Image (cartoon, rainbow, N blue to C red):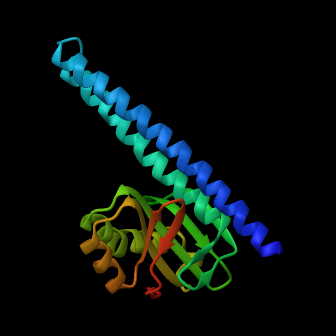
Amino acid sequence: MKQLHWIEKGIKALQQSQLEIEAQQKKTDEQLAELIQQHKAGEVQLSETKRILSGIGINIGEAAEDFFENSLHENKVLGDVRFDSIAFGLHSQKGKVQDEFDIVMYNGDSVAIIEVKHKAHSADLENLITKKLQNFRTLFPRFADMHCYLGLAAMRFPKKLAEQAEEAGVAVLRQKGDVLVMNKNLRAF
């Protein structure tokens, strides 16, 4: 019964998060439509349009990060691996190497690095496997000998890209209705 309550609480939190994301997306759509009208009418210059569109892109990305942060905070699991702790927006610099990691989960012998995008692209997967993993091990040497799992989270995930990620052993995290779903074909790097 206690586990059922925990699941219900998690579902309610996800539903609330989804409502907030939908409200933000609706607001963004309205702002974009207004901006396009202003641009067509000559009321807004191109440089201003670029600045505003950049802000909209940032807001959309932050909404995706919020969804996945909330989901994983409630259930710190990637594939079949359960994690004890989670960190968001982890920044570090060591010499010329600097990087930001959207979500990092860890336990006694494993660490998971999850990159969050609104829409995943093949370059995101390649960057995660080659650059992000290497940078993480350089910037956080205390985790270098741990099992390292990778995840790519996105609100929009092209089917072919999801298949490529799964074949590579990278967790695919995506939204399905009010819940988070991911593949089970996960491997340590």
Q: Is residue 87 above or below residue 31?
A: below
Question: On the rendered image, what quadrant is the N terminus found in?
Answer: bottom right
Quarter where residue 111 is shown: bottom right
Q: Residue at x 20, y 19 (%)?
A: 39
Q: Residue at x 60, y 71 (%)?
A: 105
Q: In this rendered view, identify the residue nearer to me: 138 or 10.
A: 10
Q: Is 122 on the left or on the right of 69, as rendered? A: left
Q: Is residue 58 above or below residue 161?
A: above
Give the total of numbered labels. 0
Where is residue 178 shown, x and y percent of the image? Answer: 54, 59
Quarter where residue 75 is shown: bottom right
Where is residue 31 shown, x and y percent of the image? Answer: 36, 27
Question: On the rendered image, what quadrant is the C terminus found in?
Answer: bottom left
Where is residue 117 shown, x and y percent of the image? Answer: 39, 57
Q: Is residue 125 above or below residue 26?
A: below
Q: Is residue 173 above or below residue 111?
A: above
Which residue is the extreme one toward the right? 2
Quarter where residue 44 is shown: top left
Where is residue 24 shown, x and y percent of the image? Answer: 47, 38
Q: Residue at x 42, y 40 (%)?
A: 25
Q: Residue at x 67, y 64 (%)?
A: 74
